[in-house]
């Protein structure tokens, strides 16, 4: 629930800020416009990272009280910015090449190909997103390595849903309908992603609680 609400609001603000920024940069054009658009797109990731990082930390506190809010937030922001850089870099490079050679923009492939590529992007992005968080977890939690594949699987499933929703929102004639569609889709994506890596956190918590009980029993005098 925490991840679902955070992703809906965080990604929603990210998309809104990017849309407003791109609209203002559209008149600029050229290489400067492309590079500024790339910088803006990456910077907007801070909205999502901040809300998701805070929400995850709040939900994790009963089981991981030793992890500080600022530490988890910083790790989430670092991972998100790196993932946004990798995510926007291919399209930015293609735009720069098209601008330099004065060629037409690349035609978008079929939706099935786009969704497949989105799943691959989620697989890689999930690893990048969670790496800095894993560095924090491994200092406090035994077996924290499961956090990386859990996020990779979570975003491999979630990313195609985002791309599908964006494509459907562009088809709708009403801005209100598009906003409702995106809000519902982002809530669903956040719930799915949170369910997958949330199960990993529950498993880690149970294993570490059990390990603590065993260690406590071994320390008791016979």
Image (cartoon, helix red, strand yellow):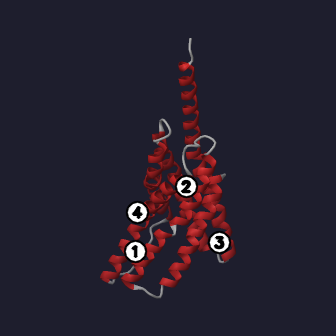
Furthest residue in direction left, as rendered = 101
Residue beneath disc 2: 158
User: Reading the chain from its start, which is encountered first: label 1 or label 3?
Assistant: 1
User: Residue 106: which disc?
Assistant: 1
User: Residue 178: which disc?
Assistant: 3
CA–CA distance between discs 1 and 2? 25 Å
Mark 1 touches mark 2? (CB < 8 Å): no
CA–CA distance between discs 4 and 2? 17 Å
CA–CA distance between discs 3 and 2? 19 Å
Mark 1 touches mark 4? (CB < 8 Å): no
User: Reading the chain from its start, which is encountered first: label 4 or label 3?
Assistant: 4
**Numbered disc in front, either 4 or 2:** 4
Is disc 3 placed on a helix, strand or loop? helix
CA–CA distance between discs 1 and 3? 25 Å
CA–CA distance between discs 1 and 4? 19 Å
User: Reading the chain from its start, which is encountered first: label 1 or label 2?
Assistant: 1
Residue 151 location in percent, x, y? 50, 49
Q: Which residue: 53% across, 64% down? A: 163
In this figure, what is the number of numbered marks? 4
Could you tell whether 139 is left or right of 99 in the image? right
Q: Which residue: 56% across, 56% down? A: 53
Residue 10 location in percent, x, y? 59, 64
- The residue closer to the viewer here, 165 or 27, is 27
Few, some or many residues within 10 Å of mark 4 (<14, 14–19, 20+): some
Residue beneath disc 4: 86
Residue 89 location in percent, x, y? 39, 67
Is disc 1 placed on a helix, strand or loop? loop
Mark 3 touches mark 2? (CB < 8 Å): no
Mark 4 touches mark 3? (CB < 8 Å): no
């Amino acid at each position: 629930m925490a991840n679902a609400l955070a992703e809906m609001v965080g990604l929603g603000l990210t998309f809104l800020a990017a849309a407003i920024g791109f609209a203002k940069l559209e008149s600029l054009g050229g290489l400067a416009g492309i590079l500024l658009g790339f910088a803006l797109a990456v910077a907007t990731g801070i909205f999502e990272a901040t809300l998701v990082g805070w929400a995850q930390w709040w939900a994790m506190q009963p089981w991981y009280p030793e992890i500080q809010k600022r530490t988890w937030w910083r790790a989430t922001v670092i991972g998100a910015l790196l993932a946004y850089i990798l995510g926007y870099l291919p399209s930015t490079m293609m735009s720069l090449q098209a601008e330099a050679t004065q060629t037409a923009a690349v035609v978008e492939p079929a939706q099935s190909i786009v969704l497949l590529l989105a799943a691959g992007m989620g697989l890689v992005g999930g690893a990048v997103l969670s790496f800095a968080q894993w560095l924090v977890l491994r200092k406090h939690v035994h077996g924290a390595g499961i956090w990386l594949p859990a996020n990779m699987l979570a975003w491999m499933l979630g990313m195609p849903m985002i791309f599908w929703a964006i494509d459907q929102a562009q088809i709708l004639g009403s801005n209100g309908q598009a906003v409702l569609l995106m809000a519902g889709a982002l809530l669903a994506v956040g719930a799915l992603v949170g369910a997958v890596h949330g199960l990993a956190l529950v498993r880690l918590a149970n294993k570490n609680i059990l390990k603590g009980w065993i260690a406590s029993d071994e320390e008791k005098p016979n």
